[in-house]
């Protein structure tokens, strides 16, 4: 149990901002939870990004907070008695800005090496001669299909992209990989194509955004693959193994396999470990089942709704998401999530797109059995 091993070193705000927590595990391993603030505007609060300092023989940091938070994080390390220079390496759960935004600052200050999935190493680069037509050539491959309006990305992202594109990455492969003694990584794509989770001994699972309490992780779209396939190369011939809802659901099933093997894991997520003034403890398999059920039900409900007539993703997004989640860029995220369900439903033959951007039910309802049949090891 989280509470048996955890001590609040520094209390913070109700959403977790400014907290520091220390975990002392039965093996003797210690981990510090070091949340860093996120501020993207709008009415919806994601809460901070939870980064973790693992005090192994040589300490290492998992994730680095968003842009501008790298030095804040180094200050917190110092308070814990760890100099940035002591870091063996920085490990990334995935290449979203709220997790790797602070990375360049930390690397500049400490010269620490960076370990991330091998697709991260492809996605952060700029390909000025190889970018698809119509995309901004200053954008890395990760952002060729940017969901945010230019007013946002011009202000928030350009410097981050440029700095990040110059980083040297020690790459981690697919499947199950040993990072160091008692630290194993698993490639679990879906929320992002480069998503990793890390198992420490048989005690702790650092899950990034692949498994979150409170909220359902945002899936990518299978169609995102087309633009980047040529920078990934022949090792990834099939987009649905690393992008989209099917990839994500398979990754949940992989997590379930880990959770079945080790049913007392302490799960440390990238967000909402503490939120609304309370701790969110997760049991791996229980949370996996909740999320699988959520997606089965969402697909079933979309099908029901389409039986009453064809609809666009936007119409369904407005029906399913609370108004506060639809403000600003929220509507784009919500629409994107519905489109990821449409992709799965279309692959099952339960819906077809029509010429006017709507989706139509075909009359079949095979999605639930298709989700049941998804194999975790598909490539
Ligand atoms: Zn993320
Ligand atoms: Zn995140």
Image (spheres, rainbow, N blue to C red):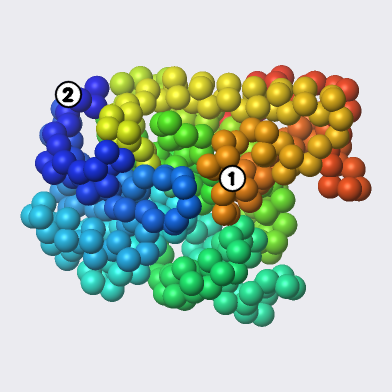
Q: Is residue 220 left or right of residue 287?
A: right
Counting the numbered discs, the total is 2
Asked whether the residues under the numbered discs 1 and 2 touch, taking CB atoms below 8 Å apart as contact, a structural biologist would say: no
Q: Is residue 127 visible?
A: yes
> Measuring 41% from the left and 31% from the top, which residue is drawn there?
213
The image shows residue 191 at horizontal and vertical percentages of 54, 44
Q: Disc 1 designates what residue?
A: 326
SS at mark 2 in the image: helix
Query: Residue 276 at x, y = what percent?
Result: 32, 33
Find residue 279 and report its horizontal and vertical position in percent.
28, 29
Quadrant assignment, res 322: top right
Residue at the image point whose x is 28% and y is 73% from the top: 108
Residue 300: image location, x then y, percent = 71, 23
Question: Which mark, by number, is residue 4?
Answer: 2
Q: Which mark is residue 46?
A: none
Residue 139 sits in which quadrant? bottom right
Dot 2, how many residues are within 10 Å of its Cα: few (below 14), some (14-19), or many (20+)? few
Residue at 17 percent of width and 23 percent of height:
4
């Amino acid at each position: 149990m989280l509470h048996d091993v955890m001590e609040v070193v520094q209390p913070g705000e109700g959403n977790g901002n400014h907290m520091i927590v220390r975990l002392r595990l039965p093996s003797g391993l210690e981990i510090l939870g070091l949340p860093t603030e996120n501020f993207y505007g709008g009415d919806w609060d994601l809460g901070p990004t939870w980064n973790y300092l693992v005090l192994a023989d040589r300490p290492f940091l998992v994730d680095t907070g968003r842009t501008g938070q790298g030095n804040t994080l180094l200050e917190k390390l110092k308070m814990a008695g760890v100099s940035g220079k002591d870091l063996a390496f920085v490990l990334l759960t995935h290449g979203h800005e709220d997790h790797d935004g602070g990375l360049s600052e930390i690397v500049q200050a400490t010269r620490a090496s960076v370990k991330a999935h091998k697709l991260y190493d492809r996605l952060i680069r700029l390909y000025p001669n190889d970018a698809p037509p119509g995309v901004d050539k200053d954008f890395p491959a990760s952002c060729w299909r940017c969901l945010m309006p230019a007013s946002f990305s011009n202000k928030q992202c350009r410097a981050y992209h440029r700095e990040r594109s110059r980083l040297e990455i020690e790459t981690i492969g697919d499947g199950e990989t040993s990072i160091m003694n008692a630290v194993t990584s698993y490639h679990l794509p879906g929320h992002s194509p480069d998503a990793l989770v890390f198992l420490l001994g048989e005690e702790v699972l650092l899950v990034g955004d692949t498994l979150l309490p409170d909220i359902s992780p945002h899936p990518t779209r299978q169609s995102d693959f087309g633009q980047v396939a040529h920078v990934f190369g022949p090792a990834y011939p099939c987009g649905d193994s690393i992008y989209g809802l099917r990839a994500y659901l398979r990754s949940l099933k992989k997590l379930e396999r880990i959770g079945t093997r080790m049913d007392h894991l302490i799960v440390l997520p990238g967000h909402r470990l503490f939120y609304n003034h309370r701790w969110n403890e997760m049991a791996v398999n229980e949370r996996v089942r909740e999320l699988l059920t959520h997606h089965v039900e969402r697909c079933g409900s979309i099908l029901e709704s389409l039986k009453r007539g064809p609809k666009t993703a936007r119409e369904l997004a407005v029906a399913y998401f609370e108004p506060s989640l639809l403000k600003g860029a929220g509507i784009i995220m919500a629409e994107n999530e519905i489109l990821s369900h449409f992709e799965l439903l279309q692959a099952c033959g339960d819906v077809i797109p029509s010429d006017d951007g709507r989706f139509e039910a075909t009359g079949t309802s095979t999605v639930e059995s298709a989700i049941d049949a998804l194999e975790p090891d598909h490539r």
